């Protein structure tokens, strides 16, 4: 753990430290009394620290960092010039009060906000803002949710030049073509995804890193729908279990049409039928799943909706005990490799770039990458030495300067 500089108590902003201490304590699920007892001070003393009325001593900062599972640098980092309202407050306000599984959801939301703050800070350190190519908010009005989802999905595919085929790099499209920040942290709660949009960070999406890739893709498309139709209303998606309100039905319809557009899927399906003599089999559907990055259930329901399969086909397979994962293994089809890890590659590249420019210490780099120092150094190597040099019949790894200009030299 990085130790604070000796001048830290006199140089840090006590108000900023107070805000960071409060957020870290709440994310840890501790009361002021519990934290004060662990620190060996009165609760009123901790309260004064969190209010910014009392500057913590160096030893207290080190102890609090250990207590909250943070680095000292996390607790002394300056606040942004225009700090947005806490994500927790925004989500609670959007839901009219407490949300289900509040303790775990609060932890997930706080971690989500920390990721967004870190991303923005790395962009500031490297002078590399994420371009925003946002469309105007879609007015879906009183349009029936299924129709609205189809219309908005078609418009977005057209705007982004995606055609009507399978969408391979969904994460790259959302980040590079739209300008959204997308993360895949492992949620402590059962939530599937979260979305928030602020002036400071722009549109931000988090999907549950514990879910399989197909579910992550669906969740990301679902949250993107909320961004398109109701940009400044924070949203948490839980796995279905009851009748959904219209805005959730719209988001699911958007995900369905955006990830599996009708015209392209019909063409692919008819191509499979023409290429074989027998009927369509579950193996054929699993092939489509792999092509579209969709789950077996989502693909079957979509094919039934398009009348390419008889309604109730999935139910009959379930009744017979069909297991998609077992069938996939028997066919030698490996489950899709997650394309999005906890952090987007651009986030990691900016962190490495800041480190190579001496804007981050090794300890800070590890904190940003959510890795220990050994694995952080390995990640630096991965990102800076990817290209073999085949000159004169031999090859070796060529070190790349991530901050070097490609033009104007």
Image (spheres, rainbow, N blue to C red):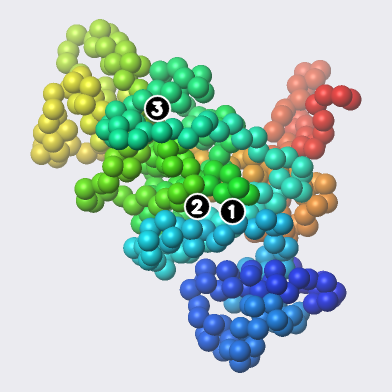
Q: Secondary structure at mark 3?
A: helix
Mark 3 vs mark 2: give the one in front.
Answer: 3
**Callouts 1 and 2 close, C-beta under 8 Å:** yes
Q: Is residue 144 left or right of residue 364?
A: left
Q: Quickly name the residue at label 2.
A: 185
Report x, y in % for residue 69.
Answer: 59, 70
Give how far apart the Cα atoms at labels 3 and 1 are.
28 Å
Report x, y in % for residue 263.
Answer: 33, 16
Q: Secondary structure at mark 1?
A: helix
Residue 293, quarter of picture: top left
Q: In percent of the image, x 65 and y 53: which residue is there?
A: 118
State the quadrant of the C terminus: top right
Q: Earlier in the sequence, mark 3 or mark 2?
A: 3
Residue 294 lies, with reference to residue 6, above or below; the image says above
Q: In percent of the image, x 60 and y 47: which residue is there?
A: 199
Q: Quickly name the residue at label 1.
A: 115
Q: Earlier in the sequence, mark 3 or mark 1?
A: 1
Q: Quickly name the residue at label 3.
A: 153
Residue 385, quarter of picture: top right
Q: Residues within 10 Å of mark 3 (few under 14, many from 20)?
A: many
Residue found at the far right of this picture: 409
Q: Say the numbered circle drawn on residue 342.
A: none
State the quadrant of the N terminus: bottom right
Report x, y in % for residue 344.
Answer: 58, 42
Q: Residues within 10 Å of mark 2 (few under 14, many from 20)?
A: many
**Callouts 3 and 2 close, C-beta under 8 Å:** no
């Amino acid at each position: 753990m990085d130790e604070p500089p000796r001048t830290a108590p006199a140089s840090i902003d006590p108000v900023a430290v107070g805000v960071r201490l409060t957020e870290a304590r709440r994310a840890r699920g501790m009361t002021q009394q519990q934290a004060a007892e662990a620190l060996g001070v009165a609760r009123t003393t901790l309260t004064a620290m969190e209010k910014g009325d009392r500057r913590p001593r160096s030893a207290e900062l080190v102890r609090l960092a250990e207590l909250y599972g943070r680095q000292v640098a996390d607790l002394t980092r300056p606040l942004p010039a225009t700090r947005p309202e806490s994500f927790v407050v925004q989500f609670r306000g959007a839901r009219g009060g407490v949300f289900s599984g509040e303790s775990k959801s609060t932890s997930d939301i706080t971690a989500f906000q920390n990721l967004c703050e870190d991303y923005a800070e790395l962009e500031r350190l490297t002078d590399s803002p994420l371009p925003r190519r946002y469309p105007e908010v879609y007015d879906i009005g009183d349009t029936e949710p299924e129709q609205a989802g189809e219309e908005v999905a078609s418009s977005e595919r057209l705007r982004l030049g995606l055609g009507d085929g399978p969408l391979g790099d969904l994460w790259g499209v959302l980040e590079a073509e739209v300008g959204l920040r997308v993360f895949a942290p492992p949620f402590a709660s059962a939530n599937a995804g979260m979305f928030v949009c602020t002036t400071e960070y722009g549109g931000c999406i988090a999907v549950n890193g514990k879910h399989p890739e197909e579910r992550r893709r669906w969740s990301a498309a679902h949250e993107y729908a909320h961004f398109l139709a109701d940009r400044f209303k924070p949203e948490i998606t839980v796995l279905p279990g009851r009748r959904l309100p219209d805005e959730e039905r719209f988001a699911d319809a958007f995900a369905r049409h955006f990830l599996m557009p009708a015209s392209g899927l019909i063409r692919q399906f008819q191509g499979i039928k023409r290429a074989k003599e027998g009927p369509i089999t579950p193996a054929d559907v699993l092939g489509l799943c792999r092509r579209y990055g969709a789950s077996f259930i989502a693909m079957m329901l979509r094919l039934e909706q398009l009348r390419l399969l008889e309604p109730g086909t999935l139910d009959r397979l379930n009744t017979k005990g069909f297991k998609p994962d077992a069938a996939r293994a028997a066919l030698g089809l490996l489950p899709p490799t997650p394309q999005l890890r906890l952090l987007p590659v651009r986030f990691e590249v900016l962190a490495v770039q800041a480190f190579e420019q001496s804007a981050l210490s090794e300890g800070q780099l590890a904190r940003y990458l959510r890795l220990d120092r050994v694995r952080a150094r390995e990640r630096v190597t991965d990102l800076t030495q990817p290209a073999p040099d085949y000159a004169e019949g031999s090859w070796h790894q060529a070190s790349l300067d991530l901050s070097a200009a490609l033009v104007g030299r």
